[in-house]
Amino acid sequence: MTEASPSEPVAARAFDQGQIDRVAEAPIADATEVSEAKAPAKAAERAEAAESVSAAGLTEEPVLLVLGDSLSAAYGLPLDQGWVNLLQARINERGLPHRVVDAAISGDTVAGGLSRLPALLVEHQPEIVLIELGANDGLRGFPPSKIEDDLVTLVEQAQAANAQVVLIGLRLPPNYGPAYTERFQQLFATAAERTGVALVPRLLAGVAEDFALMQADGLHPTAEAQPMILETVWSVLAPLLGHTD
């Protein structure tokens, strides 16, 4: 459950990543429409980044693939300020060889990930896959057991391609009721147990509770929050990279 004040209107609270793409009362299509409007600019930025990597001669280095939604797509921020880009900078600073591929799309769902991952695995042949999906499924009220099973399928697809996996946990706002929100949050731990993969329990830990670290929409983290998100992910990812801080 979020620590936002119970007296505040639900739509005004800075919820955890379960509400990353829209307030619960908003039409499901709104975030997708916004993200599609911004997609060309984001695609151009990513193309430039890919060209820079290629020019640096890193195309043969092991790939770390991020499959996610708006939290991993630098929603509302310049792409270079997002935690995924900061992850590449951290890897470079540590002298590690990995190249990060950001395959996150704002508004994406687990079903979207299932449709996209096979081609991404063939194209990039990643050594490690980070999966940050499921919040939009939860906002639509899908059965947690279905979300869990689909996440397990995603993980198994990556494992079948000889990739190590980190599953990233998310959290829904409290207006979905305690039974559903608690079961939703637990499904990530259960999916990680079923597949034997590493788990980041809660991506926005220490961020969603602080209004100063959220954008004006109250839903997406600010640029100042991105290093904190990176640290949350790094604590679980670093051992898989063969590095400890």
Image (tube, grey):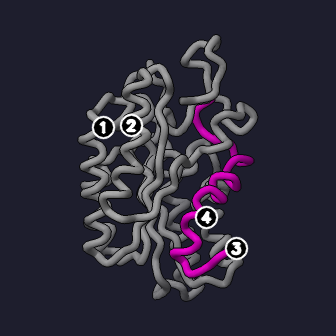
Q: Are marks 3 and 1 in contact (CB under 8 Å)?
A: no
In x, y percent, where is residue 52? 58, 76
Classify 178 as above or below 207: above
Q: Identify the image quadrant of the C terminus.
A: bottom right
Pointer 4: what residue?
Answer: 234
Q: Amino acid at mark 1?
A: Pro
Provide the residue designation for mark 3.
Answer: 245
Q: Is residue 124 visible?
A: no
Mark 3: which amino acid?
Answer: Asp
- Disc 3 and disc 4 in contact, CB within 8 angstroms: yes
Q: Which residue is labeled 1 in the image?
A: 144
Q: Is residue 199 left or right of residue 111?
A: right
Mark toward the start of the polypeptide (3 vs 2): 2
- Location of residue 30 with respect to 159 vertically, above or below: above
**Amino acid under label 4?**
Trp
What main secondary structure does the magenta stretch of the protein show? Answer: helix
What stretch of residues is rendered in magenta? 218-245
